Amino acid sequence: MSATAAGPASFDLDRAWQVDPRVSMRPEPFGALLYHFGTRRLSFLKNQTVLAVVRSLADHPSARSACEACGVTEAELPAYARALGALADSRMITERSAHDSRT
Amino acid sequence: MTLAPDLAASGGATSPGKLTDLFQLGLDAPICLTWELTYACNLSCVHCLSSSGRRDPRELSTAECKAVIDTLERMQVFYVNIGGGEPTVRPDFWELVDYATAHHVGVKFSTNGVKLDAAAAARLAASDYVDVQISLDGATREVNDAVRGPGSFDTAMRAMGNLRDAGFTGFKLSVVMTRQNIPQIDAFKALADEFGAQLRLTRLRPSGRGADVWDELHPLPAQQKELYDWLVAHGEQVLTGDSFFHLSAFGGALPGLNLCGAGRVVCLIDPVGDVYACPFAIHENFLAGNVRDAGGFEGVWKTSSLFADLRKPDTGGACKSCGFYDSCRGGCMAAKFFTGLPLDGPDPECVQGYGETALAAVSSSPVAAPRPSVDHSHRTAPSRPRARAGGAVPVTIAPRRPPSHDCDESPLAGFSAGPDSSSGCC
Amino acid sequence: MPEVSSTGHETETEALASDELLVEEVSIDGMCGVY
């Protein structure tokens, strides 16, 4: 069964997102590993582009903007929305509130 | 070095492919690893994969352990499974656990429960980053103590009660599945539920002292199927440490990576700093280096020729033509090695029966199955005849290694049962 | 139960779906070689 249940389909590309501070992100040759120290969940990012998107989320006003800046095409966007939705479901990324600071 | 030039270059342009294929080439650091802190143990379980019992005089010092933790932090190893022997008998156990969690390395420690009194349980309940795994191999005292020794069932029950009373839920109750305890599988689940624990079922391997009892304890074919069906029915509620990927040939894959992680995503650091491909493969053939080497643990993980070999793509060998190879991946390297089977052939417990055929062929050879290179068993434990390759038991009993140090005379010298035990004898 | 994709041998349709996924999750206990 493909992982396109309620979560990923409803991921809001137009909101601001960030990686949860309890997540350890580890780049690898194939992409990256994400481990959440609070939930003990482990996620794999399977290419370099999705890693670049996730890393840049905090620097963009929206996930859509982060995707575009990392070279994600219109055709590829649904797949990236699904990916970000999966990360949101497992609380690896969370929505950024107005007063969240960015370095 | 982990090299995956094609994957790195593809970016997002091509299909990401199967996760297991990406992992076959290895990672820049393990995801998690097992770290045996000491070979000392208050028990003498008959199937001990590390042949533990007596402390080794060359065990890493507190400072050396902290240096390893610093390395794991730098490499971003997410968590360590701290085991042994019995890790809690080390006087610096709590100090090391605290050091690890303060340095972004999550800890799960595996224990028989001997030191988990109410105070220890309270301390654990207060920490977010330390998980506990209690070992138990029978749902009743009779079945358990036959494998783990008299008093061990009661020790585990007491420890679990203390954890529950302290409000620590979700700790792991970990069982090695045997011919004797598979009939108790529902009782194990009930026990875990009773204590608010998560049940974890794992595979018996012919490793360490396990080689001596493999023939009598390993599950029968019908029991393997029963176990598989039960695991499928219980889904992700029950953990397995991915130890039953060889059973995937029965049908759909069980949860997990479904591949041998040795040297690719996991490894073992033993009490004297030796780095092995995995805890079930404590033998010089699977020794990658030592953390005391110039490059430390990081150097071993990244430059060991053994690990480079393990990270080469798996071509399947003799299993290549079998339609089930894709799901079972040829099974467990350690299970094959310690039963004298070739590594590029079937697992001894291959669900298609190819393992049995292979074992029968090997048992006609005069060469004995490989023996573990280290043996820290208590000298008071009865010596059991080593199984030959294929399972036949030789007539002569091989002598054990003589003690190398005065400490060996009293394995728990200086280790009191209380929480404030002082240093050991050396 | 949360929708978590598993790796390993699957039916053909499942395999296509997980091959296309850019993010996959596996239990931290899902690695063989940790006892």
Image (cartoon, helix red, strand yellow):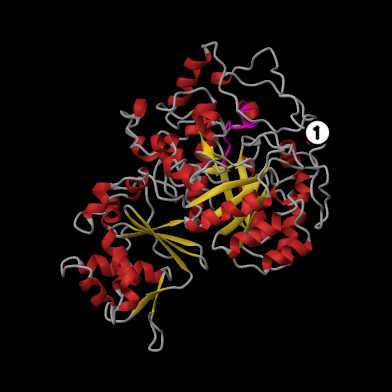
B375, B300: nearer the viewer: B300
Question: Is residue B230 placed above or below B284 in the rendered structure?
Answer: below
Assign the N terminus of chain B to one quadrant of the image: top left
Question: SS class of the residue under badge 1?
Answer: helix
Q: Which amino acid type is marked by label 1? A: Asp
Question: Is residue C26 placed above or below B86 in the rendered structure?
Answer: below
The chain that hosts pointer 1 is B
- Res. B189 in view: no
- Res. C25 in view: yes
Q: Position of residue B285 (x, y in %)?
A: 51, 29
Q: Position of residue B391 (x, y in %)?
A: 58, 20
Principal SS element in the magenta part?
Answer: loop
User: Residue B204: within the magenta?
Assistant: yes
Most extreme residue toward the bottom is: A99
Residue on which the image places disc 1: B406
Question: Is residue C13 placed above or below B390 in the rendered structure?
Answer: below
The magenta span reads B203-211
**Who's the residue at 29% across and 60% down the image?**
C22
B126, B161: nearer the viewer: B126
**Who's the residue at 42% across and 41% down the image?**
B303
Question: Is residue B409 placed above or below B189 in the rendered structure?
Answer: above
Task: State which quadrant residue B52 falls in.
Answer: top right
Q: Position of residue A54 (x, y in %)?
A: 33, 69
Q: Is residue B69 left or right of residue B25?
A: right
C8, B38: nearer the viewer: B38
Task: State which quadrant residue A4 falls in.
Answer: bottom left
User: Residue B88: within the magenta?
Assistant: no
Task: State which quadrant residue A93 falls in.
Answer: bottom left
